[in-house]
Image (cartoon, grey):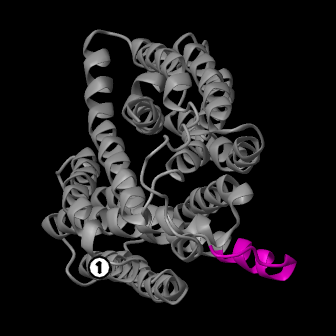
Amino acid sequence: MSALRWAAALGNADWHLAAPLLAALATAWHTDIATVTTGLAAYSLGQGLALPLWGWFADRYGPGRSLRTGLLVAAAASVGSALCPGPAWWIALRTAAGAGFATVTPSVSLCYESLSPAQARQRAFATLTTVTAASAIASPVLADTVLRCGSWRPAFAVIAVLTAVTVCRIRAATRPLPGPLPGSPPGPSEAARAAQDPPRAGAGGRRAAYCTVLGLGAAEGTVMLGLPALLAPALATAGSRTSTTAVLVTYALGVLTSTFVLRRHARVWGPRRLLATGGSMGVTGALLAAVVPGTAVLMLSAALLGTAWSYLHTTLQTWLPRLLPPPARARAASLFSASAILASSAAVALTSSLLQDGRHATVFAAGGILCAALTCWTLLVARRWG
């Protein structure tokens, strides 16, 4: 499992690494910030578009091959990013890196499918979230360190080397599990298996399940990814002297600390209680940012939204793919993540101008209402999960 966590951590680190380097990139290539910032959008676009393809690949050829192939693409793109001569190449290589690291979500989800019961799966996802949150905190540190050394290029070289090393460790981590040993205790009963693996639905039921996965992914992305992404620009447009990096680190710390508590709660709480806890945290964080503006409140909102992400996202990761039969579960995980990424990008693009106009209350109040609606929807879906 450590190799899988490394893969997820590297993908998240690569996601967060470029933002602190934008000013250095613009200076090195004698261009403006807006041009190099396009690489961030290209990364998200590449990841969102590649996710369904990797989901199909993982279902068809297995998570091990999917991970190795995708990480090799990501490592090559990171090498290219370290050697990149200009902004056009930068945008293309960032798109390729996002597409390569997109393999992590469906592949890891499929690997964790072997864990039983569901509480064990959720604790595994919580541990994975802890690792990715730590990598989000470490990324700005790596960026600042290489900039102090005089160049931004070693940052991507480090990602490339670590990704290549991880590829070498993936084979053992994703080797199929052996069957039961002679004399071992019997496995779960047919009734227990049926409770965790509902019978396959017909074509209409499968279409409804795919629509639910896509819809919940888009709703979660709009709220749980979109709102945290808006905290930094909200802080900047409010005229605060606090570094915008501070609010991002606070969000990551909220994710990191809450997952330690979540692992204990996942042992005894059902999915509905976990979803309700995460949803209430998200609603509270969004409404606080809308009603009580200020630096301290935005920091508190960041921590609450980080907690909401831990509870909501890991619960949906654990249960939502099981709306589909086993041969389609990697696709379900990838479609869920793809719709979340694309929806969050659209939400940030549509609401950034409102923040520039000082309409913070409108943006975060709408986010709070959407988070409440998302929570109610997840609770309705979770009735079949127990």
* Residue type indicated by callout 1: Thr
Q: Quadrant location of the C terminus?
A: bottom left
Q: Which residue is under mark 1?
A: 277
Camera-side residue: 198 or 13?
198
Q: Going by the image, does 341 lie left or right of 225? A: right
Q: Is residue 277 above or below residue 86?
A: below
User: Does the magenta run of residues contain 320?
Assistant: no
Residue located farthest toward the left when viewing the structure as drawn:
296
Q: The magenta stretch spans which residues? A: 198-212
Camera-side residue: 213 or 271?
271
> Principal SS element in the magenta part?
helix
Q: Going by the image, does 327 lie left or right of 254? A: right
The answer to whether residue 353 shows anywhere in this view is: no
x and y percent of residue 239 in the render? 24, 59
* Mark 1 crowd level (few <14, some 14–19, many ≥20, 10 Å Cα): some
The quadrant holding residue 136 is top left
x and y percent of residue 370 in the render? 47, 83
Q: Going by the image, does 386 lie left or right of 306? A: right
User: Does the magenta run of residues contain 211?
Assistant: yes
